[in-house]
Amino acid sequence: MPELRQNFFTKEWVIIATERAKRPEELATHRAAQTQPSFVESCPFCPGNESKTPPEVMRTPYGGEPWTVRVIPNKFAALSSDVQPVRSLQHLRRRVDGFGFHEVIVDSPDHAGFFPFLPDEHIASVLRVYRERYNALSRDRRVAHITIFKNHGLDAGASLQHPHSQLIATPVIPSQVRHRLYEALRHYDDVGECMFCHMVEREIGDETRIVCKSENFVAMEVFASPTPFATHIFPLRHMASFGDISDLEINDLARVLRTLLAKIYVGLENPDLNFTVRSGPAEYAGARHFHWYMSVIPRLTRVAGFELGSGMFINTVLPEAAAEFLRKVSVEKVLGAAAGK
Ligand SMILES: [Zn+2]
Ligand SMILES: [Zn+2]
């Protein structure tokens, strides 16, 4: 029987279409294994081509390497830090001059360095760079919201193959985020506790949608997942802002994120995917009602007319089946290979 499920955070409904249900493995992309070279001479993000990018914002040196992670302004930035966010309202038309920051974080000098193949310590240094840029830009009073994200593969919007993440700081709060903030505040007002802590605790007790868990983080399938295999990673400690994550937690998150991405890579055969960090603003550090998390979305299906017309998604994979499938995918080989690098 098909079922409608409501997203606890947004109150949005999705249709879990068990009638047309797919077994999780049917969604595997069956791509021929493609080995990327470690270096591509024409790639602007490969070592030696640093002059092909705009002047760098920061880099982290490590061992004998000139750099391990680089941050640069996006050459084709969606927003510009050279203008001021001046607002205007003309009749019903509200606008703001296109102020913002759009940065690229080059994850590694290795052209083939997708997260599952990088050692945990390297991913931890990428996450520390995320935190540093997040906190630095959060201090700019003109910035209202920061999104950190990664596009992996053409269908996920990646135009350059070399593994990289991005950060966009906007002078406004996007409506999806605002909606979650409102709902979180409403829940806190009604129940007196963080709705994310509340849900995470119950999901851990239930176990059916948990993919993996560590001392500080849990990765789980979303109960009312709009798309197959949409997975969230939550810090177990209540934390409203990603900027508040400790070094110890970063090391732990590196392992959990890498394990999850490796399971998706192996189990679904390297699908295109996006991940994002959803966080309250930096000044939310002590807020009791919001809780940051990471969202990993494999791009296995396409958005069609019904989704566009109604805003309601049809998901053909039971989140519980997706969790069970991912739990069983063995990634020791992938994780072990990078550890030996
Ligand atoms: Zn490259
Ligand atoms: Zn919480």
Image (cartoon, rainbow, N blue to C red):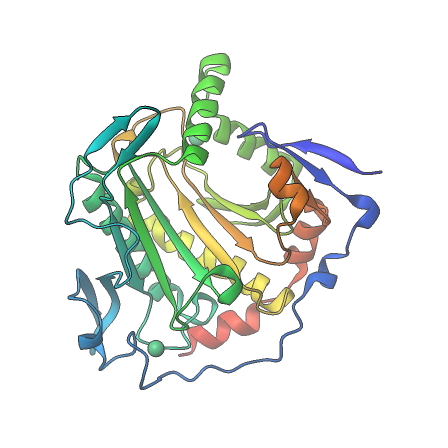
Q: In which quarter of the image is residue 89?
A: top left
Q: Tell me where residue 198 appears, x and y as whole percent.
A: 53, 27
Q: In which quarter of the image is the C terminus?
A: bottom left
Q: Quadrant of the N terminus?
A: top right
Label tally? 0
Indicate left or right for 128 with 226 as reference: left
Residue 315 versus residue 88 in the image, above or below: below
Which image quadrant is residue 325 in? bottom right
Q: Looking at the picture, tell me which residue is in the foreground, 132 or 80.
A: 80
Residue drawn at point x = 34 percent, y = 34 percent: 173
Q: Residue at x 24, y 46 (%)?
A: 100
Q: Which residue lies furthest to the front in this view?
A: 91
Front residue of 330/277: it is 277
Quick check: 218 left or right of 16?
left
Q: In this view, does 238 lie to the left or right of 269?
A: left
Does residue 143 sit above or below 316 in this rendering? above
Percent of width and height locating residue 332: 56, 69
Note whether 57 is above or below 81 in the view shown: below
Taking the spot 49% from the left edge, 73% from the top edge, the residue there is 336
Is residue 208 something that shows in the picture? Answer: no
Q: Nearer the viewer, residue 120 or 112?
A: 112
Residue located at (33% from left, 29% from top): 93
Decide which of 40, 311 is in the foreground and name it: 311
Image location of residue 46, percent across then percent down: 29, 78
Q: Which corner quadrant of the figure contains ligand 2? A: top left
On the image, the x and y values in percent for residue 70 come to 24, 66
Does the rendering let one see residue 170?
A: yes
